[in-house]
Image: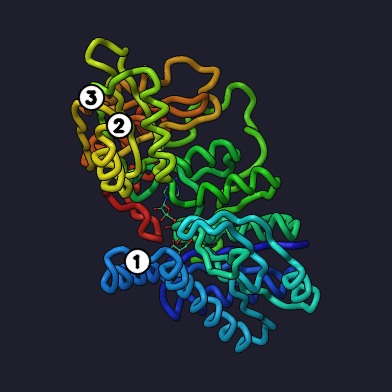
């Protein structure tokens, strides 16, 4: 039986936690034999390395930045190899390139193109625990890349797929996938099972517990995912397959919050013909991801276009659009940061009318202004002021019957400190 495990930064934040994880890996090794373990950087290391880079260079070169960021994970695998060998467990630590992880050359958000697993297979056959640095790979030109924040989950699933592992276990600081981030919604409930599609939506919409690309890969290769805590042995959450309930099952599975959203509005774009092609072509060329798009009906004053984007891209988008003002021919550009997207997700929504109405009623009754809306078969997202996002999430969580009343009655924080009022 082949298993890939992954331990996140919070599970490795201190030497004591590293030793705790070493004990867990040793136990898994004794129970199941050789396995692959993907590790993240310790605690906030990646943030610290980023801050360090910014102190040296206002706009660090992306390839040099990736080389720097990749070091965090290397520290973890080296320390873990020591700890495991001290425990009599044969272990070998591999950086991404040594583990055969080949990526595209898009520094900072590289995509995994292939995994050459021969070396991994050799070490597994040799009876070893193979520790692999998460979040990193190498290009065809042998430059080190990183996969984007939270990308160690994706490393783990890619390895599980390449090795045809029976499952991929993701160990983190929360004991499973909840109906909402327990840090934001104290009454969030742990889910025993989530489908790939539901998890994909939740992850894309801001539930950082899993990297969206990890869920995508798991779905594509049919790798069952298991999310649990590294701090104790409580049962976690399984992700995979189809919804298990018959038609009476849940309509809404969860509520996700993404707190880094911005909006740009261009007023009076002329001529309206081809305006969208020009505008979004330009943004795509600059690799600026656009999320929700709203356009007005074109009138004599041209077309109004609003779109939301990641807050981190706002400055670049404004610069770009201001520089192209004459070719885009618009009257005014309004930019707004400090927004958030709150999303209600559920596979059962497709066949159940009234969810959107419920969302708007709940928010209107609470005096929360909805700035943008987008829907798909299994989600409804609204953009609101960031200060109101957590309250909106809690209200929607209650309105759709997701609250864990026991949590309310006990009012006790979870052992991981997960239940913190935002
Ligand atoms: P790691 O360092 O292990 O990768 P992350 O910080 O990336 O951990 O992910 C774990 C965090 O995800 C939790 O502490 C929790 O606050 C957050 N989170 C967001 N949405 C959810 C959710 N729906 N269920 C569980 N945790 C969630
Ligand atoms: N260390 C990286 C990050 O902080 C990757 C990860 O933890 O998954 O984003
Ligand atoms: Mg993570």
Asked if the residue at tag 2 contacts the one at tag 3, i.e. Cβ–Cβ closer than 8 Å, the answer is no
Q: Nearer the viewer, residue 128 or 25?
A: 128
Secondary structure under the numbered disc 1 in the rendered image: loop
Q: CA distance from mark 1 to mark 2?
A: 30 Å
Q: CA distance from mark 3 to mark 1?
A: 34 Å
Query: Residue 224 location, x and y as percent?
Result: 67, 49
Q: Which residue is mark 3?
A: 267
Secondary structure under the numbered disc 3 in the rendered image: strand
Which residue is rendered at x = 54% and y = 59% of the image?
Answer: 105
Please identify, in this view, whether the residue under mark 3 or under mark 2 is nearer the observer: 2
Query: Residue 207 location, x and y as percent?
Result: 43, 46
Q: Is residue 420 left or right of residue 148?
A: left
Give the quadrant of the N terminus.
bottom right
Between disc 3 and disc 1, whose residue precedes? 1
Q: CA distance from mark 3 to mark 2?
A: 14 Å
Q: Is residue 410 above or below residue 150?
A: above
Asked if the residue at tag 1 contacts the one at tag 3, i.e. Cβ–Cβ closer than 8 Å, the answer is no
Q: How is the image coloured?
A: rainbow
Q: Mark 1 Cα within 10 Å, few/some/many (few <14, many 20+)?
A: some
Q: Which quadrant holds residue 294?
A: top left
> Can the viewer see residue 234?
no
């Amino acid at each position: 039986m082949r298993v890939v495990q992954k331990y996140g930064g919070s599970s490795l934040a201190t030497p004591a936690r590293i030793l705790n994880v070493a004990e867990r890996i040793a136990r898994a090794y004794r129970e199941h034999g050789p396995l692959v373990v993907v590790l993240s950087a310790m605690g906030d290391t990646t943030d610290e390395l980023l801050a360090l880079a910014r102190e040296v260079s206002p706009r660090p070169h992306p390839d040099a930045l990736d080389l720097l960021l990749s070091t965090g994970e290397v520290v973890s695998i080296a320390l873990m190899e020591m700890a495991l060998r001290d425990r009599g467990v044969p272990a070998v630590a591999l950086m991404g390139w040594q583990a055969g992880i080949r990526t595209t050359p898009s520094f900072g958000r590289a995509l995994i193109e292939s995994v050459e697993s021969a070396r991994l297979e050799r070490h597994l056959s040799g009876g070893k625990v193979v520790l692999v640095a998460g979040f990193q790979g190498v290009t065809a030109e042998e430059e080190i890349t990183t996969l984007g924040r939270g990308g160690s989950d994706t490393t783990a699933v890619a390895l599980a797929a390449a090795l045809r592992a029976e499952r991929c276990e993701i160990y983190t600081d929360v004991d499973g996938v909840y109906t909402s981030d327990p840090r934001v919604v104290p009454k969030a409930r742990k889910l025993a099972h989530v489908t790939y599609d539901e998890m994909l939506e939740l992850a894309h919409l801001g539930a950082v517990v899993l990297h969206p690309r990890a869920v995508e890969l798991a779905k594509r290769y049919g790798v069952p995912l298991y999310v649990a805590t590294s701090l104790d042995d409580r049962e976690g959450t399984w992700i995979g397959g189809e919804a298990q309930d018959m038609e009476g099952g849940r309509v809404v599975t969860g509520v996700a919050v993404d707190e880094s959203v911005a909006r740009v509005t261009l007023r009076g774009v002329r001529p309206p013909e081809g305006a969208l092609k020009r505008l979004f072509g330009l943004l795509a060329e600059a690799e600026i991801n656009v999320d929700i798009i709203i356009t007005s009906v074109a009138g004599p004053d041209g077309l109004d276009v609003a779109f939301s984007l990641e807050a981190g891209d706002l400055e670049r988008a404004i610069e770009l659009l201001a520089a192209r003002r004459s070719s885009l021919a618009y009257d005014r550009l309004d930019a707004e940061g400090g927004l958030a997207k709150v999303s209600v997700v559920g596979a059962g929504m497709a066949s159940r009318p009234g969810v959107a109405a419920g969302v708007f009623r709940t928010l209107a009754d609470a005096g929360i202004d909805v700035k943008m809306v987008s829907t798909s078969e299994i989600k409804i997202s609204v953009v609101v002021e960031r200060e109101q996002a957590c309250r909106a999430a809690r209200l929607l969580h209650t309105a759709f019957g997701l609250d864990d009343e026991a949590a309310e009655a006990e009012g006790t924080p979870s052992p991981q400190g997960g239940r913190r009022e935002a």
